[in-house]
Amino acid sequence: MFVDGKPDIQTPRPAWYIMQMKKGTSVSSLVSDGDYDRVDATTGFSKKFPPTYFLHGTADAFVDHKLAVKAHRELKNLGVETELLLGEGLAHTFDLQFTHQDPLFIKYVLPGLDFLQKHV
């Protein structure tokens, strides 16, 4: 969906989705029946949900970081081991743009990899 940190408008799928976002119809075009509860990931949460790590940029134009905050809070309330790290001012897929030595990789990506390693 991104090339060098910019939207890929040369590929049909990302170009279509970016157009839906521009029109404000990104969710309604995918959930045409309006039953948003059907696609709400939090409806599948239970005490047996696996440990979950959330890494989300606060400047994400595609998915509001408040959804990660909500999901984290709901899992925590169920007693599921979960962690949340918000990348202040960082956009969608920001974690894919760093090298291993990049300070932002160390600050944001490594903790998630440590969490994963601990639980796999």
Image (tube, grey):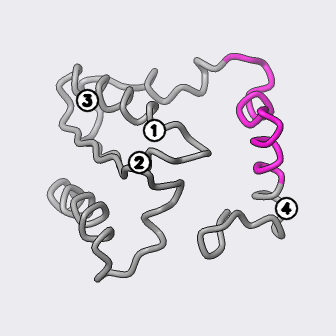
Which residue does the numbered mark 4 point to in the structure image?
Answer: 12
Q: Which amino acid does label 4 sit on?
A: Pro
Q: Which of marks 3 and 2 is nearer the N terminus?
A: 3
Which residue does the numbered mark 3 point to in the structure image?
Answer: 48
Q: Which of marks 4 and 3 is nearer the N terminus?
A: 4
Disc 1 and disc 3 in contact, CB within 8 angstroms? no
Q: Looking at the rendering, which quadrant does residue 33 occupy?
A: top right
Q: Which amino acid does label 3 sit on?
A: Lys
> Which residue is depicted at the point 44% across and 31% down?
66
Residue 56 or 119: which is nearer the viewer?
Answer: 56
The residue segment tinted magenta is 16-35
Whole-angstrom CA distance, mark 2 to mark 4, is 25 Å
> Which residue is depicted at the point 76% across and 50% down?
18
Residue 111 or 79: which is nearer the viewer?
Answer: 111
Q: How crowded is mark 1: few (under 14 residues within 10 Å), some or many (20 or more)?
A: many
Q: Looking at the rendering, which quadrant does residue 101 occupy?
A: bottom left
Q: Is residue 23 above or below residue 101?
A: above
Tell me which secondary structure the magenta stretch mostly adopts.
Answer: loop
Which mark lies nearer to you, 1 or 3? 1
Q: Residue 65 carries which label?
A: 1
Whole-angstrom CA distance, mark 1 to mark 2, is 6 Å
User: SS for tag 3?
Assistant: loop
Whole-angstrom CA distance, mark 4 to mark 3, is 38 Å
Q: Is residue 9 left or right of residue 120?
A: right
Disc 1 and disc 2 in contact, CB within 8 angstroms? yes
Which residue does the numbered mark 2 point to in the structure image?
Answer: 56
Whole-angstrom CA distance, mark 1 to mark 3, is 24 Å
Q: Where is residue 27 in the image (x, y as percent from the top left)?
A: 71, 32
